[in-house]
Image (tube, helix red, strand yellow):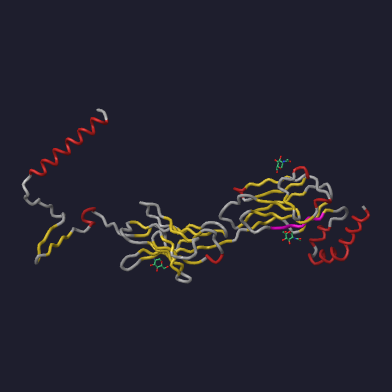
Amino acid sequence: MSVEGQRCLCVVVLLIHTVRGAGESPSPPTLPSSSPTLKTEQNELTVSFPPLEDLYGNTPEKHFGTENNTVVTSQTGSTALLPCVIRNIGDGIVSWIRRKDYHLLTVGLTTYSSDQRFQAIHLQHSEDWTLKVRFVQKRDAGIYECQVSSHPPTSIFLRLDVVEARAQISGPTEKYLKPGSTLRLQCSVVQTTEAPAFVFWYHNSRMINYDVERGINVTTDPAQRLSDLLIPAASASHAGNYTCVPNNAVPASIYVHIFNGENPAAMQSSSPSYVRLNLNGFLLPTLVTIYIIR
Ligand SMILES: *[C@@H]1O[C@H](CO)[C@@H](O)[C@H](O)[C@H]1NC(C)=O
Ligand SMILES: *[C@@H]1O[C@H](CO)[C@@H](O)[C@H](O)[C@H]1NC(C)=O
Ligand SMILES: *[C@@H]1O[C@H](CO)[C@@H](O)[C@H](O)[C@H]1NC(C)=O
């Protein structure tokens, strides 16, 4: 049957029902015991419904689907999501409160805080009333309360931990190399909850990610939070300060010395202060002399 035909049939069936309904005698319907009952008392009409659980056979009690005292960890600068799932909320309204100062952040979908980084996220028909905090800062760490209006109100508490992601270059903070040897620096981004979008390497103040013609090879694996800098044949011009700068983490630096002669790194095993003394008192003047002679 065509769609048109089906529609026609529906209209006809509906009409028959309407006409039959109108023609019936107005005798009161006989109600089953668990249906709504009508009572007339002193000119007042009282309507009482059986408890919902009788109709459904179970208790649709309001309860939280998110575990109480859940901990959420976010890194500074990222977006934190604090979940709050409530089953059978009925006409309850969800509010988020920051406990450290009892600051009311959101009521329903309205943000009450003047800090617009806070927002309640709720999709229609979903049971989730997530609190979204954009550009998380260290001071956002603490306890947050997801409260549902009822008599009395019920709440769960979530803890937001804020970590500061930072870069870390493996090995000591100073490196000593002979000309022609391989310089390999590995930078890892630690304490992260989000992968970096990019990692820049700086040699002193110059960004060197794309300095292939200067013998520099940078490979970054954001998913592994790793970035490698490789200089297969280091020369004196490669000496200096190397800084690894992820877009979403505190940078890290390492100083590279390139020189001919005894490797002072060998002395490092004895005592760091000894190395420092030597560098200042003896090695650095020697280095300077070498460069001047050249
Ligand atoms: C959640 O835990 C707090 C104590 O940490 C308690 O006061 C509160 O009643 C708990 N909420 C629920 C829904 O169990
Ligand atoms: C850069 O190094 C990676 C390995 O770390 C290597 O696969 C790639 O071929 C190198 N690129 C150049 C231009 O040398
Ligand atoms: C290396 O560069 C970084 C970033 O410019 C700077 O913070 C750091 O102090 C420098 N380190 C040295 C030893 O010059």
Residue lying at 49% horizontally and 64% vertically, measured from the top left: 115
**Front residue of this view, candidates 105 and 72:** 105
Residue 279 at what x, y percent from top left? 84, 63
100 to 293, vertically: above or below: below
Magenta span dominant secondary structure: strand
Provide residue 196's location: percent of width, then percent of height: 61, 51
> Total marks drawn?
0
Residue plotted at (81% across, 55% down): 257
**255 inside magenta stretch:** yes
In which quadrant of this rendering is ligand 1 seen? bottom left
Residue depicted at 12% across the width and 58% down the height: 38
Residue 67's quadrant in the figure?
bottom left
94 on left or right of 250: left
Horizontal side, residue 255 vs residue 46: left or right: right
Q: Is 163 or 68 nearer to us in this picture? A: 163
In which quadrant is the N terminus drawn?
top left
Left or right relative to 183: residue 21 = left
Indicate yes or no whether the magenta region holds residue 244.
Answer: no
Residue placed furthest toward the top:
1
Q: Residue 206: horizontal and vertical position, in percent?
A: 74, 52
Q: Tell me the magenta residue range.
A: 252-257
Percent x, y of residue 35: 16, 54
Extreme residue in the right direction: 293
